[in-house]
Amino acid sequence: MFDNIRSDFATHGRDWGAQGFWVMIVYRFGRWRYGVRPALLRKLCSFIYKILFKLVQILTGIELPCEVIVGRNFIIDHFGGIIISGYARFGDNCRIRNGVVVGLRRVDEPCAPVIGNNVDIGAGAKLLGAITVGDNSIIGANAVVLDDVPANSIAIGVPAVIKPRRHETIRAANG
């Protein structure tokens, strides 16, 4: 847990005031508590987690439940209006911005998006349903993504239109 928190701190620019970092601390604690023994102590940690989760949700407007699988270097840029389903999965080096929803398309189908590595999700984007977003993709601001996005693509518009990225852009993103 502490190694992940140190990494999250570095990822968020070593800024104690970054709301995204606050959310990641609570998220990491929530994941860590599953391994706590004995059961009574785990229940106490679960109670503390629920209080911290609600507090961070109220203060930041970000809902990132501990059931979500998040890779390394996950960055939450800007705060407010971010809702992520507990069924979602994120790869390494993903970035999301304010107003993003990553969730279910229908309540009766508990399937949320699976996001690959190096994905950048623009402000106000909505990713809904059992979709996969490939590695090195960009989701444009306010895009509504309802279908799979192949690797090295850009999704823009409502509903999202998917276009391939240019090779120069991909090389620059991968360093």
Image (cartoon, helix red, strand yellow):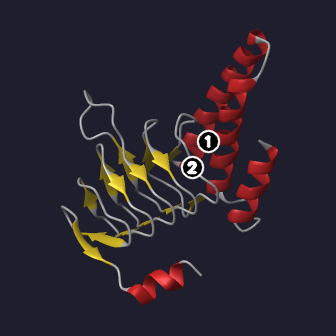
Question: Amino acid under label 1?
Answer: Val
Q: State yes or no: discs 2 and 1 in contact (Cβ < 8 Å).
A: yes
Question: Between 73 and 62, which is closer to the camera in this rendering?
Answer: 73
Q: In which quarter of the image is the N terminus?
A: top right
Q: Is residue 145 visible?
A: yes
**Real-space Cα separation, disc 2 to disc 1, in angstroms:** 6 Å
User: Secondary structure under badge 2?
Assistant: helix
Asked if residue 156 lies left or right of residue 72, the reply is left
Q: Name the mark on residue 56.
A: 1
User: Secondary structure under badge 1?
Assistant: helix
Question: Between 153 and 122, which is closer to the camera in this rendering?
Answer: 153
Name which quarter of the figure residue 47 lies in: top right
Q: For the point 63% across and 40% down, which residue is it?
A: 27
In x, y percent, where is residue 39?
A: 74, 11
In x, y percent, where is residue 16?
A: 76, 58
The residue to which callout 2 is attached is 60
User: Considering only vertical position in the picture, is 165 above or below 83?
Assistant: below
